[in-house]
Image (cartoon, rainbow, N blue to C red):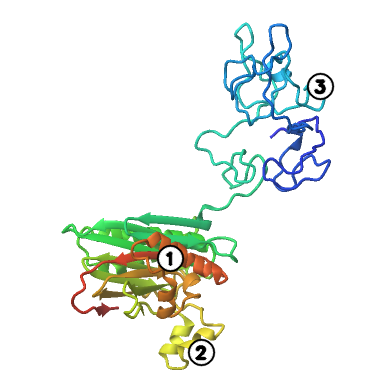
Amino acid sequence: MKMSQNHQETALSRCPGCEEPLEPGDLFCGACGYDLSAVPEPPQDHPTVAIATPARDGTPESGSGPAPGQVAGSDAGTDRSAPPVPAAVAGAAPAGARADGPDASGDFELAAPAAAPAAAADGTAPDPRTSPDPVQAPAAGTKVCVACRAGRVDNDGYCENCGHAQPRERDHMEEELGSVAAVTDRGLRHHRNEDSFAISTTALPDGTPAVLAIVCDGVSSASRPDAASAAATTAANESLLESLPRGTHPQQAMHEAIVAAAESVNLLAQEPGRSPENEAHRQQNSPACTLVGAIMANSLLVVGWVGDSRVYWVPEDRASPPARLTEDDSWAAQMVAAGLMNEAEAYADERAHAITGWLGADAYELEPHTASFKPDRPGVVVVCTDGLWNYAESAAEMADAVPTDAYERPLHGAQVLVGHALDGGGHDNVTVALLPFAVPVQGAGSAYSSG
């Protein structure tokens, strides 16, 4: 970017680019880097009257101003919110026109217009070597800076005009697909979002619809946790979309999806040029994540997981008891299972969230867990990372946090749950998917198999 050589002091009180307060004499905005030399000093009297149309004798005619949006003596409409164009740029000013500038001539310096300079009288194009450098507007489809609203964002995520870093796309994402919805947020303490999700729909061979949700939480102490969670969600989702339509039982399909996700994360640990036999000696701090997923198909609810992300069942009729459908691969869960601590004691310990199972090349052993349920009443399936359940740990607490209209409005429900975590402190990335489950109110629901 070229900067003007004739810098002038500004009398503006706030930056035109970001509204940051300015000090007298500032040449650039300290917040966004806006070049204040390209901004004309505002007129002292802030006129609001229209430019008059000259009478035949050359004096302004009362009541004969131009039509709204037009400059006197011009047939083309112009933007009235734009600063007046000096004669040096627009040609001779109409007789009787008021010069709104620091002096009567209106000869203050303006940034060159974005439009291409007009051709010379003989039809030849202006010489770019002698023409002032125009401020190029970003091309259509180009990402525009959120700070200065003018510069193009480069491939590294920085504005080429003001230099501001842009928010990452994964910091907050929402998606709604039919009756399933998911929201993820960076939270209030992490510098990036290391969670990821995938939601999709497909059909079984008999045409029965199937709804899927996969949620992954990157292990922050590992390298590239954001890449691990993204790879795992993509691989698991693609595996399910391939296996369910060909007739694989949903529980087996979930098992295969977790294996596919683990393989995709393992590949991230491999470096080009290294022989496989050396890989076993470098599996410390490999990319890693947890995974939890749910499938609704043919009146079945199938869940699968590795790690400490969870699935909860919240009946639409809140008089019915909610339930947690997964068991954590964590230090706290092991202590409770061994009878060494009760749940309150275990989760109060500083080691509670140390996970004992994850996806990654340095995992001890891959043990996908799957379980199938057949609910007997409508409800909402909550698939989430610990960034949410840290603030609603028990099934009853989660049910209280889920809005009562989440069955009809899953995206709104997911938004509310993310807000619940942020209101609670937002110490971690937060991701939740909601799947409304509709079944006839008949029979008895039970978990008929698990692994």
Q: Position of residue 36 (x, y in %)?
A: 75, 37
Write down the residue under mark 2. 345
Label 3 Cα crowd, 10 Å radius (few <14 / some 14-19 / many 20+) = few
Amino acid at circle 3: Ala
Q: CA distance from mark 2 to mark 1?
A: 26 Å
Identify the mark at residue 341; answer none if there is no mark.
Answer: none
| Residue furthest front in the image | 62
In the drawing, does residue 404 fall left or right of residue 74?
A: left
Closest to the camera, between mark 2 and mark 3, is: 3
Write down the residue under mark 3. 104
Q: Measured along the vertical axis of the image, is residue 137 above or below residue 29?
A: above
Q: Secondary structure at mark 1?
A: strand
Label 2 Cα crowd, 10 Å radius (few <14 / some 14-19 / many 20+) = few
Sooner in the amino-acid sequence: mark 2 or mark 1: 2
Amino acid at circle 2: Glu
Q: Nearer the viewer, residue 324 or 9?
A: 9
Write down the residue under mark 1. 432
Q: Secondary structure at mark 2?
A: helix
Amino acid at circle 1: Val
Q: Measured along the vertical axis of the image, is residue 375 above or below residue 225?
A: below
Q: Nearer the viewer, residue 166 or 220?
A: 166
Please say whether residue 282 is visible from this viewpoint: no
Quarter of the image with the C terminus in it? bottom left
Please say whether residue 69 is visible from this viewpoint: yes
Q: Position of residue 264 (x, y in %)?
A: 40, 61
Q: Say which residue appears at 37% left-offset and 61% top-offset.
A: 409
Q: Position of residue 317 (x, y in %)?
A: 31, 74
Q: Secondary structure at mark 3?
A: loop
In the drawing, does residue 61 fall left or right of residue 244?
A: right
Q: Nearer the viewer, residue 340 or 409?
A: 409
